[in-house]
Amino acid sequence: MGQRLPLPPIEHRSKQILSHYRIRKAEMEKLWEVFTSIDRDRNGFWTLAECFILAKEQTNSTVAPLIHSLFYFADRGNDGNLSFDDFIVSFTSFCALSREEVLQFFFIVVDSDRNGYVSKSELKEFFAYRPPGVDSAPVFPLNNKRALGLFRDGHWERLHFDDFAELADTFPNITFPAFHLQELVRKKLLGLQFWENWDDERVLKMQQDADLASDKTQTDQPGRATMKDILEYSTRKITENVDPTVKKPTDGEDHGEGSTQETVTREKDEAMAKNPLLNLIRNPTCAYHVPYVTEEFRRLQEEARKLEKDKQKRQLLAELNIPEGAGMDDYSISGASEDWSPDV
């Protein structure tokens, strides 16, 4: 038997995520042992095939397309290889999902274009899944497609999440593979008891918070959110990262009603940063991926916003024929002050 490889470095953000799930150094060591035992060529990466080995499932099983999706979500480099860092964050986040979040996971798998709903045609296409490169029958039974015709007598074309959850309650066999896959992965990664304790802790926390907040999103709870919350948060964060001049909830001074709304938004954002469903999605090509913003990136964003504000100020001064660098006391501009800016 070869020498056991040491635990590789874990990124700071990854450690933060793992700490939400009560995963410390001892648990990381156990997960590293699982990872290396399946990483047979010992190159420090997993391929999709090794994910099937973890679950002990065949490529023609009903969980196969969900294994594909879980691997795709975790594949941060989008190159067909998973590092231990990607594995430990994405797969433990998958284990940490509540029953509602498992349904959200299934919903996101089908809603690949992130339009906020799943259509009947998208579900039919998913249930027509066949193993790649294999000439075989679809892995899902015909009953799944029949259920789509029976639900609401077939008088529907698309479902938002609450409607989809109703479909899953009416025909639980449709989403059973997602729950089954989670159980398989939980058994391999720290065991069912560890994750059942985690489930109990989350439920207890929500019960304790029930009297403190009527909103569905519990700001002190590790990331519980509705699909509406997830869509709004991911859309806004993507916009902020594409355009660094977009104001954040923390931008500006704290005063008035706007400040109160910004505080609420900031608290919800802090809760969403703990959302296990969003944390398991590391592949930037996934429509639901939310980019993680480092402190360095925040600094660059702040510099970009400052440059944009200075540019607007110079343009206004030029329009008023005020020389750049001239003292404000030399000119009469109503409302001007040292912290004056043209966008206020």
Image: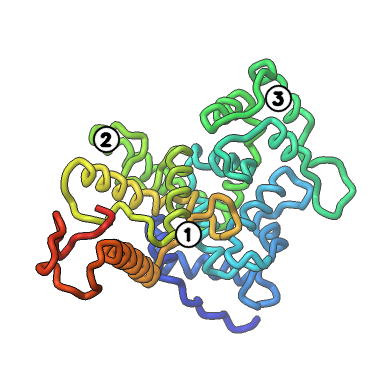
Tell me the element at label 2: loop
Residue at which label 3 appears: 147
Local packing at callout 1 (Cα closer than 10 Å; few below 14, some 14-19, many 20+) is few
The quarter of the picture where the N terminus appears is bottom right
Camera sees residue 154:
yes
Where on the picture, by quarter, is residue 216?
top left
Q: How much space separates mark 2 and mark 1, taking CA atoms?
A: 33 Å
Which mark is nearer the camera, 2 or 1?
1
- Outermost residue on the bottom side: it is 3
Viewer-proximal residue among 279 and 267:
267
> Is residue 179 shown above or below 23?
above
Camera sees residue 179:
no
Marks 3/1 in contact by CB < 8 Å: the verdict is no
Viewer-proximal residue among 120 and 46:
120
- Image spot of residue 221 (x, y percent): 34, 45
Q: Which mark is residue 316?
A: none
Residue at which label 2 appears: 213
Local packing at callout 3 (Cα closer than 10 Å; few below 14, some 14-19, many 20+) is some
- Image spot of residue 284 (x, y percent): 56, 60
Please name the residue shown 55% across and 27% down the image. 163
Please name the residue shown 36% across and 39% down the image. 217
Q: How much space separates mark 2 and mark 3, taking CA atoms?
A: 37 Å
First in residue order: circle 2 vs circle 1: 2
Q: Is residue 107 left or right of residue 12?
A: right
Please name the residue shown 46% across and 72% down the image. 10
